Amino acid sequence: MSDADDLFIREDPVFVNKELLEINHLPDEGRIVGRDAEISQLANAVNPAIFGQSPSNVLIYGKTGTGKSLCAKYVSGRLIDTAEEEGVTTDFAYVDCAQDSTETQAVQTIASSLNDPEQTGVNIPDKGIATATYYKRLWTILDECYDVVLVILDEIDKLDSDDILMQLSRAGEAGKLTDCKIGVIGISNKIKYKDRMDERVKSSLCEREFVFPPYDAAQLGDIMQARSDAFREGVLDDSVIPRAAALAAREHGDARKAIDILRYAGEIAQSTGAEVVQEDFVVQARQRAETDRFRELIRGSTPHARYVLQALTLLSLNEGDDEAFRTTRIYELYEQVCRQEGSESLSLRRVRDLLKEHAFLDVIEQSRHSGGSAEGSYTEHRLLEDPEVVQSVLMDTE
């Protein structure tokens, strides 16, 4: 046997279908756990589409990992099948607004995903044409191919502007479409996102609003149990799922993180040659999951955004994980970090803006306080992540 033959594992001793533990995997109907009420409400909102009528526009709120995108895709998929039985042609387009944050990128993604060039004769290039031209081609595609279309805008708060929301929500009213009806499902982790919207968009887009609560330990346990056949029979210790569910429910109620923990625990068993995925691996897996998630969160952030976060992290490590610190204290330490890095520090005002950006990403929490007539009002900032995890990631991204 050559060295090359020893390099790869021909038969995985831990996983039999690891895809079930990938976040982007859309489970079968029976695997969607703990969201029956939310699925029913969402289906009710878009139900008119099966008769060729306009579905309600929907805005879904909830923390990361509460099943918002999962349920929106599932209901949209079921709608297509049900409408077909009624002789109505429907489809849905999914846009990840964190990736396609500009109006042009978003409308190009929608048009490209819904287009059937053989039927429409329309070409949707990746780039090179005006935004208005993308819209004209989108309207042609919709009227030519569909009776009703749903557009799912995931992480809608990441859009640069409300322009595409205005276009989609008022396309019929403005005479852009004659045969096709559009429904928009906006998804956001930010409960106050609606406050930032243009009033004209708000009036047409926010017909229905749903809030998805975090999962509890029982629901998280059921979610992981429904995906446990990702592992080979007998490999998963009985205590692993309850422990992972308890940890996730206590800290965040996030199904994505819970599934990540389960997958990482399996990978730890795999890498150590263990025959069983043990409960001890769950704690190690949690640390790895948090580190990887946070690394993804701050990837692409500017050096000074990291310096500000480093200052808050150092304060948290020195004075307590749960302590909150004033902007001025963070700024003083930030200036020291800049000197150490050989970089010129930004103004206090710009650092305030960077702290607001971290708060928007749920990396930190901000609270406003009044110091009375002597001090006036001030803002305190508290790190929401484990400071040791943050420090580790920041060191890796230098």
Image (cartoon, rainbow, N blue to C red):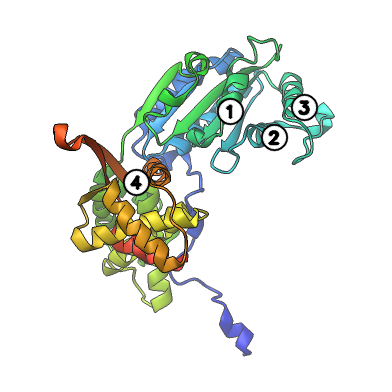
Q: Is residue 85 visible?
A: no
Residue tagged 4? 254
Residue shown at 19% from the left, 59% from the top:
319
**Helix, strand or loop at disc 2?**
helix
Q: Rounded to the nearest whole Å, what is the CA distance between mark 3 and mark 2?
A: 10 Å
Disc 2 residue type (three-letter): Gln
Q: Rounded to the nearest whole Å, what is the CA distance between mark 4 and mark 1?
A: 25 Å
**Helix, strand or loop at disc 3?**
helix
Within the image, what quadrant is residue 332 found in? bottom left
The earlier-in-sequence mark between 3 and 2 is: 2
Q: In front of the other: label 3 or label 1?
A: 3
**Left or right: where 141 falls relative to 316:** right
The earlier-in-sequence mark between 4 and 2 is: 2
The earlier-in-sequence mark between 4 and 3 is: 3
Q: Are marks 3 and 2 in contact (CB under 8 Å)?
A: no
* Vertical arrangement, residue 165 with respect to residue 109, above or below: above
Q: In front of the other: label 4 or label 3?
A: 3
Q: Rounded to the nearest whole Å, what is the CA distance between mark 3 and mark 1?
A: 19 Å
Q: In front of the other: label 3 or label 2?
A: 3
Q: How crowded is mark 3: few (under 14 residues within 10 Å), some or many (20 or more)?
A: few
* Vertical arrangement, residue 165 with respect to residue 8, above or below: above
Disc 4 residue type (three-letter): Asp
Which x, y percent locates residue 229?
42, 56
The earlier-in-sequence mark between 2 and 1 is: 2
**Which numbered tag is attached to residue 108?**
2
